[in-house]
Image (cartoon, rainbow, N blue to C red):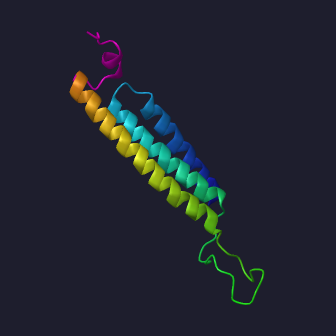
Amino acid sequence: MTTLFAFIIGGLYAAALFMMLRRSIVKLVIGLMILSNAANLLIFTGGGLVRGAPPLIPEGMTVPVHDIADPLPQALILTAIVISFGVLAFAVVLIHRAYKVIGADDMNKMTSTDTQ
């Protein structure tokens, strides 16, 4: 299962980098979304995959009796989701403003405009 996730994460990173290297700003934002999802999946997979085990230690015990799920990667992913949403919202607003000012979606046209 971990090997399958490794291939999926690699594919997501490759797709994100491909989209971010395109000329269109909309494709840049889509690549940014895919990149944040790939990073979240990487953190989730790095934390270990334990199916059906709660992240709890029974009362009165100091060590877990059975396998438990690590709650730290889950907390990191929740934080990463909030941060990536904030970055994505900022990027969308910035791109919308740039499109209104310049009137082009192509990054080459944005960099070659004359400032008067």
Was residue 48 drawn as part of the magenta stretch in this picture?
A: no
Image quadrant of residue 108? top left
Q: Magenta region's main secondary structure?
A: loop
Residue 113 rendering spot, x and y as whole percentages: 29, 13
Residue bounds of the magenta highlight: 103-116
Q: Residue at x 54, y 58 (%)?
A: 77
Residue at 52% from the left image edge and 48% from the top image edge: 38
Give the vertical position of 113 relative to 75 (above or below): above
Q: In which quarter of the image is the C terminus?
A: top left
| Residue 53 against residue 80 in the figure, above or below | below
> 104 or 86: which is nearer to us?
86
Rendered image quadrant of residue 32: top left
Q: Which residue is drawn at 74% across and 90% down?
A: 60
Furthest-right residue in this view: 62
- Looking at the picture, how far across and down is residue 63, in whole percent? 78, 80
Q: Where is residue 96 in the image (x, y as percent from the top left)?
A: 27, 35
- Extreme residue toward the bottom, this view: 60
The residue nearer to you, when weighing 81 against 115, is 115
